[in-house]
Amino acid sequence: ARTNLAPIKMMLQLYVTFLLLPLWPTFSLQNEVDNKVLRYKIITKFKSSFFQDIEEGCVSKALALSEELPTTKVNCTMETPSDPTRSDEFAEIVRSVIDTIGTPEQVSGIAVGVNSEEVAEAVNEVMKANIPVITIDSDSPTSDRILYIGSNNTALGIEQAQALIKLRPEGGNYSIIYSKGLNLIERKDAAMEELRRGRHVWKNVTTFDCEDDPIKALGHIDWCGENLCDAVISVGGWPMENSTEWKRVVSKYPDLTTIISDGTQNQLNVFREGLVDVLVAQQPFVMGERAVQILYNNTLNGFTEEENITLTHLLEHIKIPTMLPPLDLEKKNVGSLVFIGYTAVIIIYSLSLFFSFWIYKNRALPVVRASQPIFLGMICFGTIAMVSSIIPLGMGDTSTSDDGANKACMTVPWLISIGSATIFSALYSKLRRINRIFDNSNKFRRVKVTEKDVMIYFFTFVTLNVIVLILWTIFAPVRFERKYGAGIDPWNRSTSVYGTCHVHRDGIPFLAVSLVLFFFVLLMAAYESYKARKIETEYQESRYITAIVTSLLQTCLIGVPSIAIVEEQPNIYYLLITLLVFLACLQILLFMFIPKVKALAKWKIAKKEKDARKARILEKKDENHPTSNLNQTHYKTSNNHHDTRDRPKLSRMMNSMKGAFSQRKDITIDSLNSLDSGRNGQGLMIRRAVSSKNWSDDENSDKTCENIEKEDKVGKDTYMNSGDNVRKLDENEVVKKSDY
């Protein structure tokens, strides 16, 4: 039995029809295009060699499109008004394409060079008649046109002005030739504005409207030559329409610089003969090709362009003189600002050496002893190393050789890294020692923290920095390079050069590691400072260290990005780095030492007053008891004998006193010194903050004197009594806990 396939065939036909249904408008349009002639017209305001090139491009592209579609013929023609000055005639030619609708001569699209409002209104009428219109060479943005094809008229005017500046940088008098077209006025205004804002003075003698007349334009060239103009700019190619007459006129004025728009074949021939200085050429042939292509695409597929403006490139033909003007090269360097850097270095050197001498001179006194002199000395050394980086930074390309400049550039990271590592590791070590003491005192543990216990942090940080710097110096050292600035002269020569220390791409990892180490120790110091915020050491040291760390963090966050911005300006770059380094070192020294200097001065005054009081008391005793000297001598002898005889017993007594005091939670500790603080001067004076309110320097000085008096009193009473006769200590009395 045969199978009936008719229903299946019908179903397949319906399925294929359903799939092809969305493409039906395209097929119908293609069928409509096939076997017919597509006529496109270019309507220009007057006849010239420029518009002839546009017509040639349009005709050439139309022939190429006809070859692609054998069943369709594409034609392109050009039409112009008989009188270029009559806008009404131009508008009527544009409207005439509407009359071709439905006739064998129907126009499929037009390209118009709009030069007036009348023509723009005609363009709108044609668009309403469903005939696509694009503008070419001169635009009318307010009209209903589909798209504009042409040059950037503002850029063309600027290019003409810059070409004049190249040839005549000394300036002078000039005239400009234009006509009343929107595109031409735009070129004229752009050229005049560019010459007005230039460094060299160009004075506009006159602006001449040639009314699109080549004879009038060439006559104005003759007038400029007779009236001693230095240059003439024409925003159109009118003066060169008649090449023979052009040669006759310009040959009379060899010193007259001529800047003409467009670059037709006739103009290029004249340029090759050296009878025109500059041609800023458009691409009329390309304009004609694009006009036909866009109109043809619109006929097939509708308008699909994303932009409503299509620009063509500009070509500049310039007669370069055999001898270019001398190059005015500006060499940017630090200059006299280097003396500001040297002044900053001298100030920090003087302060650091003064405070170092002050530390050494007063190292045995309680104020300096409590501040840990070894760390204070490290801070002074670090500021000297850090501020020394300003010296090689000021060595510009005019003050040293390339080899010396390379070494100076590599010296900068060495000094900054070593100096900053020394300063911040010293600050970290000081805070770390204080926090360790109080962490253990809160747990009622006996601990002795010496400088050696925390110096490991200093040596670790410095060693890591030195290792990174050595590898950096060996494998990718910082080099001194001369770079050219962004400015150029009219002949594209750089006008400025500056020297800078350049970090090669291979050196970036070493720079990154150095920055990581710097910020790591800075953040560690900030963390220890935060932990010590409720601990007040003598003379408010923790408070000042916290201020230093916080201010330096702010300085780095603000200063480092600013330095990167001004790299091309060596004077500002040098001044900014100098100020940052100087202020960083200055605030470290002042915050660390000024409070201690003031506290030491007050302590000396208080001690002097105390000694005076003791002297007055002894004088009164001598007056009341004439034999007191003998008794004192006997007391000293017996006391020494007692000390030698009962030393083990006294040691047991002191240990029992320490145990009794360690059991009390309400003891006020005004001074925690190391085990040998009374003998070798290595004590660390710290007090527990009883409230968040800070004590003043006067209170610090008084309390320090009270501590000394109480310690002396406790020691005297201990040695005067022996065995079980040791008196009971008052709970408000302060005892020196040497085990801390």
Image: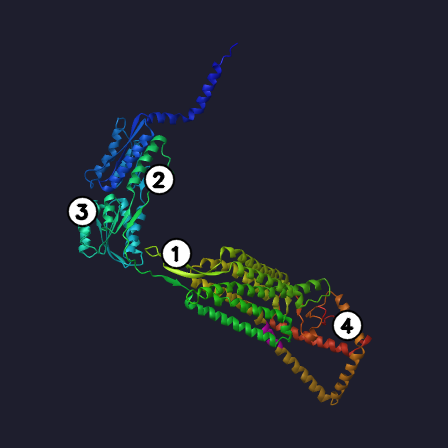
Q: Three-letter amino acid code at disc 2?
A: Asn
Q: Which one is earlier in the sequence, the residue at label 1 or at label 3? A: 3
Classified by dominant secondary structure, the portion drawn in magenta counts as helix
Give the distance between the C-alpha atoms of the residues marked 1 and 3, in whole angstroms. Answer: 44 Å
Q: Is residue 608 visible?
A: yes
Q: Nearer the viewer, residue 252 or 302?
A: 252
Q: Of the residues tagged 1 and 4, which is closer to the observer?
A: 1
Q: Name the residue carrying label 3.
A: 244
Q: Nearer the viewer, residue 30 or 448?
A: 30
Report the disc number at residue 308: 2
Q: Name the residue carrying label 1.
A: 486
Position of residue 201 measured from the top left corner of the image (x, y, whole percent):
28, 59
In reply to whether residue 39 is colored magenta, the answer given is no
Q: Which one is earlier in the sequence, the residue at label 4 or at label 3? A: 3
Q: Three-letter amino acid code at disc 4?
A: Met
SS type, badge 2 = loop
Specify few, some or many for label 4: CA neighbours under 10 Å numbering under 14, 14-19, or 20 or more.
few
Q: Which one is earlier in the sequence, the residue at label 3 or at label 2? A: 3
Q: Which one is earlier in the sequence, the residue at label 1 or at label 4? A: 1
Q: Is residue 728 above or below residue 150?
A: below
Q: Quadrant of residue 52?
A: top left
Q: Three-letter amino acid code at disc 3?
A: Thr
Specify few, some or many for label 1: CA neighbours under 10 Å numbering under 14, 14-19, or 20 or more.
few
Position of residue 311 measured from the top left corner of the image (x, y, whole percent):
33, 42
Q: Is residue 586 above or below residue 187?
A: below
Q: Three-letter amino acid code at disc 1?
A: Ala
Q: Name the residue carrying label 4.
A: 654
Give, as a single range, the part of the protein colored magenta: 596-603
SS type, badge 4 = helix
